[in-house]
Each structure stands twice: as C-alpha cells, then as structure tokens.
Image (cartoon, rainbow, N blue to C red):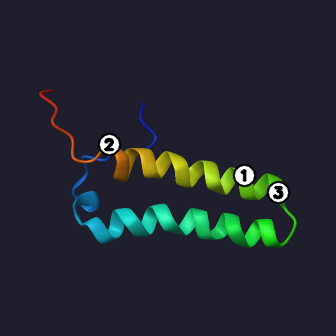
Amino acid sequence: MRLIDPDHPFFQAAWRRWLLVLVPFAWAFVELNNGSTIWAYLSAAIGGILAWNLIITWPRNRDD
C-alpha cells in the first residue's frame, strides 16, 4: 500500500504538488521556532516524503 498515489488526477497540476510539499516544511519551521523539535522533525519528514513522491520523481514513465 502506498501512502500517496502520485498518479491520481488531483496531482496533475504543478501548483498543487508544490503547495502540498511546502506546507509541511513551513509548519516544521513554525514548530521549530516554538521549541517543539520532535513535531518539527515529523513535519519535515512528511514534507520530505511528499517532495520525493510529487517533485523529485515526477514525471513517471511507467509501463504498469
């Protein structure tokens, strides 16, 4: 089971992909400024997973 399906039509627009990646990183910055390092790391990890799936490995040329 995948956590996110990058082939879903919702993710075709580039601005949506970038927004979904930037929001967790912005929230990690807020949490880090408030002194909550664990929540900041968790938010940054979520942003990293989204960045990998929606930005770095985009577009996909799969034959399945």
The Cα–Cα distance between marks 2 and 3, rounded to whole angstroms, is 28 Å
Q: Are marks 2 and 3 in contact (CB under 8 Å)?
A: no
Q: Residue 36's image quarter?
A: bottom right
Local SS, label 3: helix
Name which residue lies at 21% across and 40% down.
60
Alpha-carbon span between mark 2 and mark 1: 22 Å
Pointer 1 residue: 41
Three-letter amino acid code at the position of disc 1: Tyr
Determine the residue positioned at 63% across, 54% down: 44
The answer to whether 53 appears left or right of 33 in the picture is left
Residue 57 marker: 2
- Left of 26 or right of it: where is 7? left
Q: Nearer the viewer, residue 64 or 14?
A: 14
Amino acid type at mark 3: Thr
User: Dots 3 and 1: beta carbons under 8 Å?
Assistant: yes
Q: Which residue is mark 3?
A: 37
Residue 14 lies left or right of residue 1; in this view the side is left
Task: Look at label 2 and name its amino acid.
Answer: Thr
Q: Secondary structure at mark 1?
A: helix
Q: Earlier in the sequence, mark 2 or mark 1?
A: 1
Q: How many marks?
A: 3
Image coords of residue 9 (percent x, y): 21, 57
Q: Nearer the viewer, residue 12 or 51?
A: 51
Of pointers 2 and 3, the one earlier in the residue sequence? 3
- 5 vs 18, nearest the viewer: 18
CA gap, disc 3 and disc 1? 6 Å
